[in-house]
Amino acid sequence: MNTATLTTQNNEYSRRFDRWVLERVRQKRGSPELPFTLEYRHIYVMPTSFGAWFGVLLALTAIGGLNFNNNMALMLGFVLASIAQMTTLLAYRNLSGLCLAGLRASPVFAGQAARFKVLLKNPEARFRFAIQVKSEEAIDCADIGPQETGQLVLKQSTVQRGWLEMAPFRIQNRYPLGLFRAWSVIIPAARCLVYPAPALNPPALPKAGHGEEGSARQGEGEHFHGLREYQVGDPLRRIAWKTSARHQKLYSRVMESPSEDACEINWYLMRGGSTEEKLSIMTAWILRAERLQIPYSLEMPTAALPPDLGEEHRDACLEILALFQP
Amino acid sequence: MINPQKKAIFWVIASLSVAMAPQIVRMPLTLVAITLFPLLWRIAAERLDWKELPALVRHAATGAALITLFFSYGNVTGRRAAVSLLTVMLAMKLIESYRIRDARLIVSFSLFLCATQFLFSQSILMPFYGAVSVIIALVALTQLHRNEAFENLGETPPVTASIFSELGFSFRLLALAVPVGLAFFLFFPRWATPLWGIPETTLDSKTGLSGSMSPGSIQSLFMDDSPAFRVKFETEIPQPSELYWRGPVFWNFDGETWSGSFFGKNITAKSRPDEQDAPWRYSVQLEPNERHWLFALDYPVTTPMDSRVSMDFQILRREAVTQLLEYSMVSNPQFTDTPELTVELKASALDLPNGSNPRARELVSQWQEEGWTGPALAQHVLDYFNQEAFYYSLEAPLLGQHSVDEFLFDSRTGYCEHYASSFTVLMRMAGIPARVVTGYQGGWYNPVGDYMLIRQSDAHAWSELWFPDTGWTRIDPTGAVAPARVNRGSLGALSSPRHMLDYTWLRNMRNGIDVVQQRWNDWVIEFGASSQAKMFSPLGLDRMTPAHLVIVMFVAIGLFSLVLLPFILRTKGPARKDPLQLLWQKFLKRLQSAGYETQASTGAIELAQAAALSLPGDAPAIYRIADLYSRYRYSPLPPPFSEVKNAVKDFHPKGSAV
């Protein structure tokens, strides 16, 4: 897992500050248990760079006003300072009470960006303005209405197969004037499964029986393979009436003509290349077999799955490949 | 580069325009045009989707603006020129501000520009200008914040707020900030002495009486109704005939222009009137005029801070008056000014240019032959003014080389300066030392505020003659021609109004309303370190130190915050409206007008099914809208918003509910 620094800012000081805060949060509260409600002790308020600049301008106005004893300029400076101070409270309040309800991510192939969904629930009857989530790599923003749940997405790039830990991120806002930023650091306990990247030009699908243990999976005649949702054109005799009645939805039996058509994806039959290259090719085969609707089996040193088709089978196979440790 | 959303940039332009308004009316016309050009260009560019100007054009425009500025002002050290520079640069910034950062820079500098305007005027109207500037700037900042937050999405924020709710939110922020701002204002320790000085040329122009008097100089003041100073008497208010506010005193005459003398300006008064029996004690609040003279009734007993009293009893301040200045004064008319006149001064008080005004000289020698001398001669001349056909009027013709001759024998129409000048010249011809004194005469008593208001139009000129026993003695030749000038004020003496709106009742009303400005000056503008120190003296705390003040300030801020906290927390922000929801409501309304009763809590599809049953003729349209609505709201691949919009727009139920 990479220890993220949580900032895209170029400023070395703010980067160092962010790292320090992150370390503190890691030590003090670690990963929050979901649902996690933001309370005052989780929320920091700091001026933005625009806020700091605005402060300098106000100080100049006040010094000029004091020097020339110009009471109206002074009053303007003081009122603006008071407005600025008030916005810290509004920024804080815009965040406090917000609830981090869930963190999800569907598996992706290595090289694709993982999309972590951040579910932010607003349990209160007030509007939350421009709530942002921001990680080192990505940012997203949404208004969250009363009693609504905002779904924000943080993309995170992937390189390797396996589990990808979600990077730390901030929930933040600069409401209402952009002078102050209220923010809370979240070290998420969420991960995304990353499948191996499919090889670009894989060899032809390996047919069963071409290997040494070729005869193992040869079946006799048509045999039942699995179920899928009814599609127009499916013959009536294929409809699985009992299952359909149970689910109130039509399902067709997927029948398989076995032997020659089934393919066998077998770790031990892979020749040449590194582990990752082999896994890449196997991934590509699984995807192709699925597309061509050719049943496929998988055999790995860690696990083996009989020939089958369908999303579940595919995902199970890909997961085995993703998590394979030689 | 990401365009700030258009709405935001319009608010930024509005913010700058409001802030620069008071400045722009004081700028030279060419500079105004140059400042408005980028503003108008940007508005047009946003409306018509023009491209950004090339860098070369932008730099050229900025360079041209700077050159014009330098030529208009000569330099940029003056306060007005410096603020003009800021204004022009901010306007120029508009043509290249395509980033939120730049737009924010413009807004925050607009607020700074607003603060600089208070250096020029702190009138009672300025707080409104300040409030409007702040409210518009807050709206601009709110919008920029939203644009920044949603910047990475590359699309407009999904919901918008109405203009009233944006303004209302800003107004609420401002209103909630005022109490704490006030606590800061009252208790933040002020500096008794400034850290750095104020440049002398800070106002647009010097106003009021000047260091010389030539024909027409007072006449122009006469058209100016702005206040010169206000006086609050602790003692009895003097009679109108005693209200001579002494200002610049002139000794030297070159045939046309009167000016001060070296001695008069540089030698300090040797003897001063007695303070014990001085009848008049008062404080003067002098409007800034960029000049050095302070005004007082004859003869000043005390010397205000940072100033001196010259031998001809001008009160001269070390630095020009660039801010409202308050000083207290004691005057005692019972005083003999200069019982002994030195030879040099006598010579200077008799000096006249050679060969000028031959007819006047002839007239004087004729009087002398008739036996008039000394005070009797002076009285004779006054009678002459009074009995001959002399007129007191603003419409005096311009006079040439022999100005006194022309006035005495030809025009015979003039204003106080003509009479004072001619009279003084006549006296000098007769060998009586004489000088011209300018200042203000009279004033308008405001019963509500219990103070006298002296306007620029009360400017006056009179003469002083020196006689061995009485010293310098005031003689007002204008009083001989138009006694009403002295008793009823400068405007009362005129037979016709100065301009179209010059009515007595209007003038009285304006003088009455002036009390508001006077109170404002007293309570707000004049508030400073000394007022803070005395703030709690009614409670027995004689002197507040800065440390005390800071404590009080924090207590006050704490208290105010405690009271205001619930209101601040209840601040809702500009009410955002969901355009999709608005469309849905429109759809529901149309269903209702067709006779279908909608229930509030049904989902879109359910509602469509029910509505289609009662309006079978419109069923496809209803289904379509419900489908678009739910897909737009929930689907990861929503249809374009325009499709939803058009579907609802074109939905006109044909039948009526079954």
Image: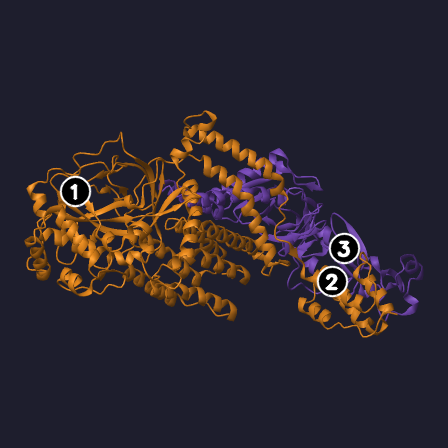
Chain colours: A purple, B orange
Instruction: Tell me the tag on residue B632.
Output: none
Query: What SS does tag 2 mark?
Result: helix
Q: Nearer the viewer, mark 2 or mark 1?
A: 1
Q: Are marks 1 and 3 in contact (CB under 8 Å)?
A: no
Q: Is residue B478 visible?
A: yes
Q: Residue visible at 72% across and 54% down?
A: A318
Separation of residues labelled 2 and 3 (CA atoms) = 55 Å
Q: Is residue B462 above or below residue A287?
A: above
Q: Quadrant of residue A2?
A: top right
Q: Nearer the viewer, mark 2 or mark 3?
A: 2
Label whose residue precedes the other's in the sequence (2 or 1): 1
Residue occupied by mark 3: A298
Residue occupied by mark 2: B585
Residue A234 screen position, x and y as percent: 87, 69
Query: What SS does tag 1 mark?
Result: strand
Binning the other alpha carbons within 10 Å of mark 1 as few (below 14), some (14 to 19) or many (20 upward) gives many
Q: Is residue A278 above or below residue B645?
A: above
